[in-house]
Image: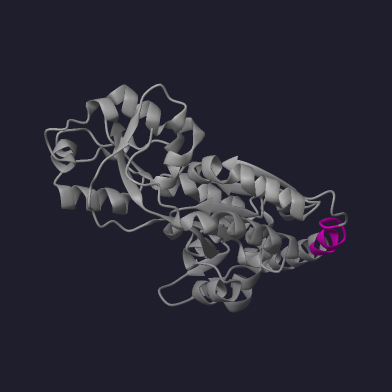
Amino acid sequence: MDEISNKLLDVKLMSFKIFKVVYEVCNFTHAATRLNLDTNAVTRRIDKLENIYGVLFKRSKNSIQRTPLADRLYPASIALLECLKDTQSTTKYKSTEEHTYTLATNDLFSISFEDRVLEHYKCATSHKLKCVSIPSASDANLYSGVTDMLEDNKFDMVIHNDINIFSQYKSEEIFRDKWVFIALEEIVPDSISHIDFIKSQAILSSGTAEIDTLIESKLGVKIDQNSSSSFSRVPEKIYRDRSIGVVPSIILKRISFRNTLFKIKVLDIDLDLPPFVLYQIWNCHSGGDIYLQNLRSVICNVCLPLSKVDIGLSAS
């Protein structure tokens, strides 16, 4: 087996799909359109291939040109894709008992919806569903790995609140909620307004840059951008740091909040903030998978009815 063939085994399948199209059209933008991907995702994949093989395309301002190395790789990539296509068509869905779908979720989904989704999906199909956790906070470096997993179908779907990170994928809104400010009831004074109280306290980052910026500008406060925490750990942090948390209201319905030894108060703050929105996100190449369509329907059926829940102004 020659050097090219050996290295084929170490490169992700999606990279070769992208390389094949780029080779054929000699244009990153046109290739991205054909693949229904973001142009940056296409160039990133080609860069990864070039780190392994060497220069595949000579780039100029308005065009790219194939190199002799690309000419050698092209027929090898076609052979590999055809081989894997034949293998997948006979094995991926050979038995409805064998396939396990992987759902990557942020922790709000994990603590608010995951149990119900797993229960409903188990009743709806014989396939298995595995959930893995990814952070809620936005971090471009962190999520480059998540998007790679989605491109390669290592994750079948992602549930997240930052749609901008996953803009090149298919998405659907599944849940909408309001943001609330919470604090320990024992530290909230009766003598001053809640807004004045907020201005005197440390505020945990919501984990969403847009929301943090709006809170800072509208209330004249400073939020520590490094203080964001998973939603499930907000009670612990506001207790330990005597601080104020900013969370979607559905969090207050969870057992983890109600089983604490301290009481949590929702602050009366009339602040016009964009809603907290959760999306389910999937790779366009898997859009025709009927079992994945079924999973998306189950998630919508569980999450959408809870979007209009009003928890009131206090919780304990």
Residue 256 appears left or right of 217:
right
Of residues 121 and 11, the one drawn nearer to the viewer in this rendering? 121
> Which span of residues is magenta-colored?
85-93
The quadrant of the image that shows the C terminus is top left
Residue 103 vs 38, above or below: the answer is above
**Residue 285 rendering spot, x and y as whole percentages:** 66, 66
Residue 270 vs 30, above or below: the answer is above
Residue 210 appears left or right of 282:
left
Residue at the spot x=17%, y=30% of the render? 189
Of residues 115 and 63, the one drawn nearer to the viewer in this rendering? 115
Instruction: Name which quarter of the figure residue 199 lies in.
Output: top left
**Residue 131 rendering spot, x and y as whole percentages:** 63, 43
Is there any visible trace of residue 6 in the rendered image? no
Residue at the spot x=60%, y=50% of the render? 149
How many discs appear? 0
**Residue 27 rendering spot, x and y as whole percentages:** 52, 75
Residue 53 appears left or right of 190:
right
**Residue 28 rendering spot, x and y as whole percentages:** 51, 71
Residue 87: say if magenta: yes
Main secondary structure along the magenta-highlighted residues: helix
Residue at the spot x=51%, y=68% of the render? 58
Residue at the spot x=51%, y=65% of the render? 168
Is there any visible trace of residue 271 in the rendered image? yes
